[in-house]
Amino acid sequence: MITSLSKPILAILVMATLILASCKKDQTSSPAENATETFNDATDEANAEAQFNDVFNATVGIDDATAGEDLGIGGNIGMGIFSSANTGNGFREDSTHERCFTVTISPKERGVFPKTVTIDFGNGCLGKDGKLRKGKIITVYTGKMHIPGSKATTTFDGYMVDSFHVEGTHIVQNVSSSNQRAWNRRVVDGKITNTNSGKWVSWNCDKTHTQVEGNGTPFWPFDDVFNITGSAKGEKSNGNSWSAEVSTPLVRKFICYWIVSGTVNITHNGVSGVLDYGNGECDNKATITVNGVVKDITLR
């Protein structure tokens, strides 16, 4: 029996049900829309990977000439922005390219840890790779990164690459065994914001870089090759999110800035795609395949 008091309550419940059903319908994407978003998510995944791999290179690339102590994993030859080797791939700096960033170390005494290293790009530093960096990368080392157990935790202060503002915490730890060199890399609450559009991507990852070639020549890194395995997840300012799982190990070579091969499975709202880094060529190209449709992307 419906009383006069219960009638308004019933009306409110019916209205709330209709509103919720309407909202649910609005939030349901079509298969075509999900496929499009999977393409977009794969592109954002690849670019987030590239952006934080750049941070990885800076973190583990500090050599004796830069810091007064070899903190990195490349022997006495730096990696990334610290490299003095001109390998002809368009990224590594040759000896005639003047560095426009400064590096400070505290404490300066050799062998004293924890040690904080700050790379300061100031208000604008154009690298040999053509990227304009600003702000600071700040890393605290518990030990030299070629020693098992050592950890490097990186944060950022106003750090930008071109028009992208980079935030979050980047953690690298040496997890090598007696016969295999390896480093675990985690990005916690990473965020990349396009300062032109205001759009952002948040990104978390847990991946391991395992050295598969060059282990026998620890002081000659040019033959080093690394396999990357693990997973990641991302979210965007438009509310979309995705998960990513490395399906075929990603291959990084010391002499190349880019991932040269390997595949990643990207999933968005039940729609899966494959991010493919190619067949070994050192370039900034990749492809994304969703429902049999292949698209080319250029990594930034």
Image (cartoon, grey):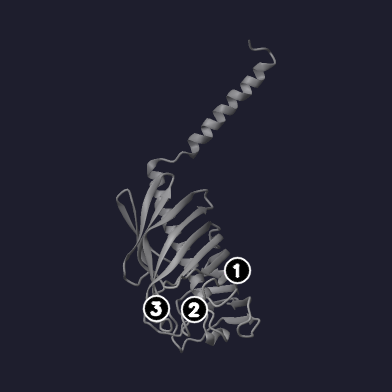
Residue at left offset 61%, top offset 85%: 110
Element carrying mark 2: helix
Q: Is residue 11 above or below residue 213?
A: above
Q: Nearer the viewer, residue 22 or 144?
A: 144
Q: Per the image, is 90 magenta?
A: no
Q: Quadrant of the C terminus?
A: bottom left
The amino acid sitting under disc 1 is Phe
Q: Is residue 191 left or right of residue 246?
A: right
Mark 1 — residue?
156
Query: Pointer 2 and pointer 1: residues touching (CB < 8 Å)?
Result: no
In space, the residues marked 2 and 3 are separated at their CA atoms by 12 Å
Between circles 1 and 3, the one closer to the viewer is: 1
Can residue 122 be seen in the rendering of this structure?
Answer: no
Element carrying mark 3: loop
Q: Which quadrant holds residue 223? A: bottom left
Magenta-highlighted residues: 153-157
Q: Is residue 182 left or right of residue 6?
A: left
In space, the residues marked 1 and 3 are separated at their CA atoms by 26 Å
Instruction: Determine crowd level at label 3: few under 14, some 14-19, many 20+ residues with C-alpha closer than 10 A.
Output: some
